[in-house]
């Protein structure tokens, strides 16, 4: 299939779009040839025999026969050049303490800790679970594991002991690397005690972890049990290891597992997404290059936690594969004041800033005075990821943070895809941007928008995003659950009898007349109102466009006449008070800017939405409160008080109904 099917080359085509299309055309016309050439930008111990092994779909394997180690490409490569003196990480703790690590420093730390891990009996293929806050030893531990061929599985430090236990039980690690504690919103979090609790729960579930390495965060003092024979101090182990330690990088097969990262699915059990050594490396390298157009003097700040895929790819592997500098920040974005991010951008002269729409909305809510206090002129690109970015939020980001001249790089991708898949590509040619659209698929990405039956939909018609060709950064599968892998991602649109395999990300999308893609959010959040399908994300977009509204979450609630009606939970911007008038106004507003069908039957006002720690709204919990169902797994919930608020707002509504009757 040619790219013409995706978008015709016309006379009118913008020169940048044309350039991007030509590159993409090349990649899709002959993927094996294309990636054979591209993969040579990286260092391999041995080149592959086959670019893509597709003999057992959907278990695709990239660069089969190839042997490498990602730490050679992220570290050894640079310490052989003048890049050794470049800053790898500017680290800043929440209280304001700072550390600076050059590439040489990072290389030394990784080698030393790799030696330590090996000494503790960790070998190729063993799992190392890392439960750590945002401190430099976190990337050190990941890279040290990778260097000796072990598989790292980072568990977000905000996760509860139960969530940690689930992941330990699933991954069965030889070792756990954790820390004593860290700062969050001015408080010290006792991480070691949470780790101990998690280990205890895991042991009851039959999985005992032999060794626990404890990094001391420095400055935090917390009480915890030190288990003799099991627990070891990172500082002691590392200080016993000479500074000139060199650990031979373990030769890894391209299709070996580099890491496991858990993500939530539609069921309660988290999915252990596996990424490969070679395919992930090649894809991250190129996707990063196209998306950020890295330059030697770049300072990138990805305001995410390394416990999520965004941190894996855009704080650790991506920047290091390109030898650029990153900022790593420990704490909350609005602590101690809402201008913390802008202060950091100014201090380190950040050139690439990458965050989530949730963070942008949060910071917008505080008002632009906080942004204006700082000189953000170093910014060259500002990125967005994780959720659809509302056009008005996009504009605020562009105008206020980006000073009206910095391109907003809206990147669509998932834990499963490894790195950005749909994004403006300044590294090839920056296409004209449209607020709220992630623009075009990158080279190698055969994206389409299809209907329920898998037929491509017309421009402007909402459908499901699909990816019709394997790409190097695709997940290897789900750890220990190949069936779930096939079922979750491939069953909906593949036709195995005809040899057709289609990846289903479960996202809604629209392609407009110009071929731009608009990602509308998860396809598992669809509402059916009086026979009309409406997307919760779209209603939310509409509500958030109202000047009084900071954030909104919409769910469907049962309705005797219409089947289902939307209910909105809304956080107001500073200076607005909840009222019946405002509720009515929001309702009419949605009717106006979207459709009357989508107007929420009720608006509940709260101060905070229930969210996961990565910032995703947990609509499931709102639904549970409203329908009186059990809350289920709340291990990823950031703040339990947010659920209590909905409970009382809902009870208040019930009382009003009673009064009216
Ligand atoms: C959503 C985060 C709209 C989407 C990297 C996807 C987005 C899910 C965007 C993956 C975007 C991510 N526009 N929606 N630019 N980026 N999403 O695994 O629904 O935490 O399926 O990976 O986030 O979330 P995950």
Image (cartoon, rainbow, N blue to C red):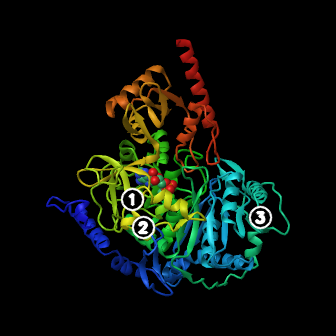
Residue under numbered circle 3: 208
What separation in Å lies between label 2 and label 3 (alpha carbons)?
38 Å
Q: Is residue 567 above or below residue 126?
A: above
Residue 519 is situated, as x and y percent measured from the top left of the image, at 38, 50
Whether the residue under disc 3 has CB within 8 Å of ligand 1: no
What separation in Å lies between label 1 and label 2 (alpha carbons)?
13 Å
**With 222 as the anchor, is 139 left or right in this view?**
left
Residue under numbered circle 2: 288
**With 240 as the anchor, is 42 left or right in this view?**
left
Determine the secondary structure under disc 2. Answer: helix
Q: Which mark is residue 459?
A: none
Residue 614 is situated, as x and y percent measured from the top left of the image, at 55, 51
**With 650 as the anchor, is 546 left or right in this view?**
left
Estimate how packed mark 3 is, as few (under 14), some (14 to 19) or many (20 or more) residues with alpha carbons within 10 Å. Answer: some
User: Which mark is first along the chain, 3 or 1?
Assistant: 3
Residue closest to the far front:
497
Determine the secondary structure under disc 3. Answer: loop
Residue under numbered circle 1: 381
Which residue appears at 56% of the width and 31% of the height?
626
Residue 131 is situated, as x and y percent measured from the top left of the image, at 67, 61
């Amino acid at each position: 299939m040619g790219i013409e099917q995706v978008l015709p080359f016309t006379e009118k085509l913008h020169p940048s779009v044309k350039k991007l299309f030509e590159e993409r055309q090349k990649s899709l016309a002959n993927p094996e040839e294309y990636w054979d050439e591209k993969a040579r930008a990286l260092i391999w111990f041995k080149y592959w025999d086959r670019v893509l092994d597709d003999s057992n779909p959907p278990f695709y394997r990239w660069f089969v026969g190839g042997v490498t180690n990602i730490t050679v490409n992220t570290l050894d490569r640079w310490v052989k050049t003048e890049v050794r003196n470049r800053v790898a990480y500017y680290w800043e703790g929440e209280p304001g303490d700072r550390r600076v690590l050059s590439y040489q420093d990072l290389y030394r730390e990784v080698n030393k800790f790799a030696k330590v891990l090996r000494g503790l009996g960790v070998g190729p293929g063993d799992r190392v679970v890392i439960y750590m806050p945002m401190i430099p030893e976190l990337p050190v531990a990941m890279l040290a594991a990778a260097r000796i061929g072990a598989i790292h599985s980072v568990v977000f430090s905000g996760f509860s002991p139960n969530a940690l236990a689930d992941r330990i039980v699933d991954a069965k690690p030889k070792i756990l690397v954790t820390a004593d504690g860290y700062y969050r919103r001015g408080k010290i979090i006792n991480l070691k005690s949470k780790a101990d609790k998690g280990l205890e729960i895991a042991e009851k579930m039959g999985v005992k972890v032999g060794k626990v390495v404890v990094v001391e965060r420095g400055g935090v003092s917390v009480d915890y049990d030190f288990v003799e024979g099991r627990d070891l101090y990172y500082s002691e182990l590392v200080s016993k290891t000479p500074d000139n330690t060199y650990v031979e990088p373990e030769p890894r097969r391209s299709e070996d597992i580099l890491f496991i990262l858990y993500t939530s699915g539609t069921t309660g059990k988290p999915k252990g997404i596996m990424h490969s050594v070679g395919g992930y490396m090649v894809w991250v390298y190129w996707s990063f290059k196209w998306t950020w157009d890295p330059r030697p003097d770049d300072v990138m700040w990805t305001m995410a936690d390394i416990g999520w895929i965004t941190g894996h790819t855009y704080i650790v592997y991506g920047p290091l594969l390109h030898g650029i500098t990153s900022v790593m920040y420990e704490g909350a974005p609005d602590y101690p004041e809402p201008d913390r991010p802008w202060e950091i951008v100014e201090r380190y002269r950040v050139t690439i800033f990458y965050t989530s729409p949730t963070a942008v909305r949060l910071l917008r809510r505080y008002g632009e005075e906080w942004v204006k206090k700082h000189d953000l002129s170093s910014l060259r690109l500002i990125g967005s990821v994780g959720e659809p970015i509302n056009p008005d939020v996009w504009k605020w980001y562009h105008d206020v943070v980006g000073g009206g001249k910095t391109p907003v790089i809206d990147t669509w991708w998932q834990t499963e895809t490894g790195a950005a898949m749909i994004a403006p590509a300044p590294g090839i040619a920056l296409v004209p941007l449209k607020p709220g659209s992630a623009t075009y698929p990158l080279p190698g990405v055969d994206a389409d928008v299809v209907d329920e039956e898998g037929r491509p939909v017309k421009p402007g018609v909402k459908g499901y995003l699909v990816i019709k060709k394997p790409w190097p950064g695709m997940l290897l599968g789900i750890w220990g659950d190949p069936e779930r892998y096939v079922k979750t991602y491939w069953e909906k649109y593949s036709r195995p009898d005809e040899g057709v395999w289609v990846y289903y990300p479960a996202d809604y999308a629209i392609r407009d007349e110009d071929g731009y893609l608009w990602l509308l959010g998860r396809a598992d959040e669809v509402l059916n109102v009086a026979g009309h399908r409406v997307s919760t994300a779209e209603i939310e977009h509409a509500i958030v466009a109202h000047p009084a509204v900071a954030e909104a979450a919409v769910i469907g609630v049962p309705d005797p006449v219409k089947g289902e009606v939307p209910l909105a939970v809304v956080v107001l911007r500073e200076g607005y008070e909840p009222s019946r008038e405002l509720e009515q106004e929001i309702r009419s507003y949605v009717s106006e800017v979207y459709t009357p069908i989508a107007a929420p039957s009720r608006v509940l006002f709260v101060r905070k939405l229930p969210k996961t720690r990565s910032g995703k709204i947990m609509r499931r919990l709102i639904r549970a409160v409203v329908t009186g169902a059990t809350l289920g797994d709340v291990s990823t919930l950031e703040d339990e008080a947010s659920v209590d608020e909905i409970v009382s707002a809902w009870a208040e509504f019930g009382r009003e109904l009673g009064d009216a009757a």
